[in-house]
Image (cartoon, helix red, strand yellow):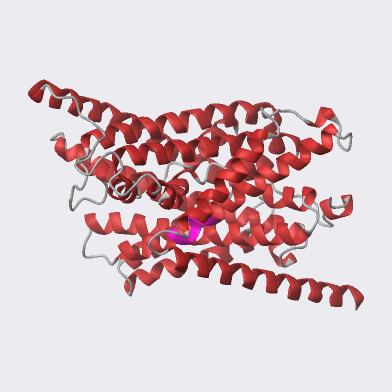
């Protein structure tokens, strides 16, 4: 267990608590409804078929729910903008865990931001083909960076409306899908089924676990509520309701939308649309609605990039506070905004401009594949920290009064989350490009571990001088 000195920072927390309850609600709800659902859904549908896709999303949603219950307990007891990175420093004996997950998660959000910028630019390019994709990426990056440099309330307000658009779009899609199913049954009197010509699972049942990275990626982002708790006005009173309610709503939205899509969208369908959702609207003959859906996907991509710059800037600020990143990034302006971290992240996100040299679709998939595994690792850390905290409470190390929200089924909920996330990580290694993913992960973690020892050595030298 880290000492109390390790938990405290010589720099006082100066982030402003300007996020309102409605901001928290939509940040958590919209954080996991991004391009992974609207665009990424095509990959599992073609790989594991309709039923396999539903099972994969249900499993990922269940893991997400168990992880968020664990995070809810921690966030209510210790609201902090660093979330699980800070909790790892508190509850896991060696700071190398906090350092590793902090930098991995930071990098995953930066790459995710680049992926979402690429996705948004791809959609904008369809409307204005004369304007290059990489220039659209740059323009969107400038706009959302400007929003974050204004105030955290500006981020909260923008995310509130982006999330509202996404939720309304999913509801509209479900209604249109049900209408199509009704029309299909009225004409043929044959009930649609999830079974394909190659069986229930066209590539075998275990293919579900191989495609779980991109499925889990769709849900990742909901843990952003843990970061936002550090800038919320009353986290202890509102977080329990938000986390439990939002988790169930997201599972409901995803499963309903995917079930409808799987029934309407024939297995093996080849189309030119950017998303199967757009294809469904076109099948319904609602041409204007398909353009509106493109706008929704555009908003979803910008929303995800918006969340990415928030999460990564707060993670960098937290690590600087915990002496795990340069103190340069712990500085905030008078509005409580970590401007230096935001600008640094924006510069790194310029990797999205590589769409000038790499096909934008391939660049998007590369960036998504590079971030999915880190989210699973983050969820493992969340569950492990909750287990350590509750064990400490039961042993009398922490007061029972610290538990403002109690996650159920201790310790099984944490164990299930840890085991299932490990299964997902290992399962991906047996996929088509699994050995490349494993190799890249080993190299990345090795670089971070080496940098930790150099950083630690440098800090010891400076303190001695």
* Quarter where residue 51 is shown: top left
**Residue 389 place in picture, x, y as percent:** 77, 39
Tell me: residue 191, above or below residue 201.
Answer: above
Please name the residue shown 27% across and 26% down the image: 175
Give the magenta range: 369-373
Residue farthest left in this picture = 187
Viewer can see residue 77: yes
Please state if 80 lies on the left or on the right of 423 as rendered: right
**Residue 391 place in picture, x, y as percent:** 80, 37
> Which quadrant: the C terminus?
bottom right
Please state if 103 lies on the left or on the right of 305 as rendered: right
Please name the residue shown 51% across and 70% down the image: 439
**Residue 421 place in picture, x, y as percent:** 56, 47
Please name the residue shown 27% across and 37% down the image: 262
Is residue 370 part of the magenta span, yes or no?
yes
Viewer can see residue 332: no
Please name the residue shown 50% across and 28% down the image: 248
* Quarter where residue 124 is shown: bottom left
Compare residues 419 and 36 and report the one nearer the observer.
419
Please state if 334 lies on the left or on the right of 313 as rendered: right
Compare residues 448 and 332 and report the one nearer the observer.
448
Tell me: residue 355, above or below residue 52.
Answer: below
**Residue 198 place in picture, x, y as percent:** 22, 44
* Quarter where residue 138 is shown: bottom left
Secondary structure character of the magenta stretch overall = helix
Compare residues 433 and 92 and report the one nearer the observer.
433
Is residue 156 part of the magenta span, yes or no?
no
């Amino acid at each position: 267990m880290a000492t109390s000195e390790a938990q405290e920072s010589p720099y006082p927390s100066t982030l402003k608590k300007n996020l309102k309850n409605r901001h928290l609600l939509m940040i958590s709800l919209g954080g996991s409804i991004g391009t992974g659902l609207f665009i990424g859904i095509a990959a599992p549908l073609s790989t594991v078929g309709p039923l396999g896709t539903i099972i994969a999303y249900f499993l990922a949603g269940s893991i997400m729910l168990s992880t968020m219950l664990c995070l809810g307990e921690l966030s209510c007891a210790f609201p902090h903008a660093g979330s699980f990175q800070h909790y790892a420093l508190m509850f896991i004996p060696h700071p190398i865990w906090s350092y590793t997950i902090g930098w991995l998660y930071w990098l995953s959000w930066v790459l995710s931001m680049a992926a979402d910028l690429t996705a948004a630019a791809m959609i904008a390019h369809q409307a204005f083909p004369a304007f290059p994709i990489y220039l659209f990426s740059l323009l969107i990056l400038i706009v959302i960076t400007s929003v974050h440099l204004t105030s955290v309330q500006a981020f909260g307000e923008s995310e509130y409306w982006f999330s509202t658009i996404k939720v309304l779009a999913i509801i509209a899609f479900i209604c249109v899908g049900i209408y199509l199913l009704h029309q299909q049954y009225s004409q043929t009197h044959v009930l649609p089924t999830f079974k394909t010509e190659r069986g229930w699972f066209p590539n075998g049942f275990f293919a579900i676990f191989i495609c779980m990275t991109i499925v889990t990626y769709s849900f990742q982002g909901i843990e952003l509520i843990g970061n936002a708790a550090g800038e919320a006005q009353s986290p202890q009173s509102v977080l329990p309701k938000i986390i439990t309610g939002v988790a169930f709503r997201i599972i409901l939205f995803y499963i309903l939308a995917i079930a409808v899509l799987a029934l309407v969208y024939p297995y093996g369908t080849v189309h030119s649309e950017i998303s199967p959702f757009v294809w469904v609207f076109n099948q319904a003959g609602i041409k204007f609605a398909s353009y509106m859906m493109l706008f929704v996907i555009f908003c979803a991509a910008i929303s995800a990039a918006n969340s990415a710059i928030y999460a990564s800037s707060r993670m960098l600020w937290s690590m600087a506070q915990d002496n795990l990143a340069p103190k340069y990034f712990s500085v905030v302006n008078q509005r409580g905004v970590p401007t230096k971290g935001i600008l640094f992240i924006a510069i790194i996100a310029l990797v999205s401009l590589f769409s000038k040299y790499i096909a934008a679709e391939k660049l998007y998939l590369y960036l998504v594949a590079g971030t999915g595994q880190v989210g699973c690792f983050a969820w493992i850390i969340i569950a492990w920290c909750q287990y350590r905290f509750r064990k400490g409470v039961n042993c009398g190390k922490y007061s029972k009064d610290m538990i403002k929200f109690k996650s159920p089924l201790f310790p099984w909920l944490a164990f299930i989350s840890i085991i299932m996330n490990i299964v997902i990580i290992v399962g991906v290694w047996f996929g088509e490009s699994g050995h490349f993913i494993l190799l890249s992960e080993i190299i990345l973690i090795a670089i971070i571990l080496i940098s930790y020892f150099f950083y630690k050595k440098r800090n010891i030298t400076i303190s001695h001088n």
